[in-house]
Amino acid sequence: MTCHSWFYRSLFYFHAIIALFECLTTITLFLLVVIYIPELFFKKEHPDSEDWDWELVSDKNKFIILLLFFIGGIRALVLIAVLTPLLFVFGWFPCFLCVKSCRQSLCRLLKAKATHRFFSFNCNCPCYRARPKLRFQLQLAFLILISLVRIATILFCLLIPHHITAKSLAVVVGISFIFLLLNSLLDYYHYRVWWKYEPKFVKLQEEIILPKTTLSAKHKRYLPYPLLGDMRTGRYGDKLCTNKSCTNRKLEHILIFHLSDYQPQPRWSQLKRLSPSADTYIGFHRTSAHAAAAIAHSDFRRSVKPPQMLGFGIYFARSIKNTDGKARFKGAIIAAEIRMGNVKEVSFNELNTVQNTNEWYPEFDTVYYNHANDERDEFCIYDETQILKWIIVVDREHDEKSADYEMKSEFYDTKCYCI
């Protein structure tokens, strides 16, 4: 367990603390300004007046201010409405904690994934399981909406003439933006853990020393294995792609919404007949976790050690499943988009013309093997510059980050359909 994993698993505590402090701060300042110290931020224009400034505000304006206050702080108010009874019961009656059943109930409540999601205002809609980016976008949209409401509150308070209480309330709302910013930073961190994933390599055959250089421009991202298509639950919103003739060639879609035996495109000869201008192809490459990490920071390297069935180059299969039995190393899967260039197609009887040599280059950029069973087709490219981009998924036995962060269990224990 690392400090980072502890921080991630404790996000709901931070959301709860922020909500608590936001409510305490805003409510305290609100009461101080309205009831006790109306001149907390601004001085009266007429100091000798004995009238309370808040009492001079019209009932209509009071209602609008309070309504905007409530809408702008809805997130914190909902969380505090749940926290208050717990704090009251166990704060004023700590003896309840001595009762084993009460203590166990409290522990179960705090450990429940539904509680974590509630405190972080994180809906457990099935569509979020495979779409961390969508989840963040909706959370960001919600925070922007709340921000706009608070800005409207500030403007409305400032536009009420000759009332320092209303202007002071505008300052209170402005202070609350600090907590809104903290919530948005936590939401962004949660999004980065999933969509800007960085594996934690373990159980490697040799010690891994990652290059100090930045990731390759071709490297789109690592994906955590809980996002793979084999992890889809089949529930509404978390189903595999059912389009039999799916034309979505995004690497994320292929890995997340299709099973490991999915072949994104027909064999090369058929694709060229259907679309003569086609030049890119989706391929899958299996290698060791150590090699995958090196590739992410640099690029692929040609295989030049015999035996090489299709010659010296970089090998790809048409599906994840069909990399099994062909790859010499295991530990990671790479899905890549490849520019095929000039392709030499060979059958079983023609393998002897290309194996253990690179004489087919530069006349050809790629050798494509038409297997008797088209599902087992594979191809070899000569130049790594033909690879346009890739996504890497490290096998779970070589990546313990998902387990440390409890990412797979994050969606367990759904309550009330979406919490």
Image: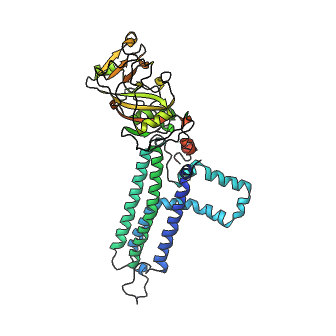
Q: Is residue 391 visible?
A: yes
Relative image position of residue 349 (x, y in whole percent) = 39, 9
In the rendered view, tell whether residue 36 sits above or below residue 152.
Answer: below
Q: Is residue 228 visible?
A: no
In the image, what residue occupies the spot 50% across and 37% down?
225
**How has the structure been colored for display?**
rainbow
> Seen in the image, is 306 located left or right of residue 411?
left
In the image, what residue occupies the spot 34% across and 80% down?
162
In the rendered view, tell whether residue 74 sits above or below residue 306.
Answer: below
Residue sitting nearer the eye, 254 or 245: 254
Identity of the residue furthest to the top in this view: 349
In the rendered view, tell whether residue 142 sits above or below residue 207.
Answer: below
Relative image position of residue 99 (x, y in whole percent) = 74, 57
In the rendered view, tell whether residue 2 sits above or below residue 286.
Answer: below
Relative image position of residue 171 (x, y in whole percent) = 41, 72
Dividing the picture into quadrants, the one containing residue 363 is top left
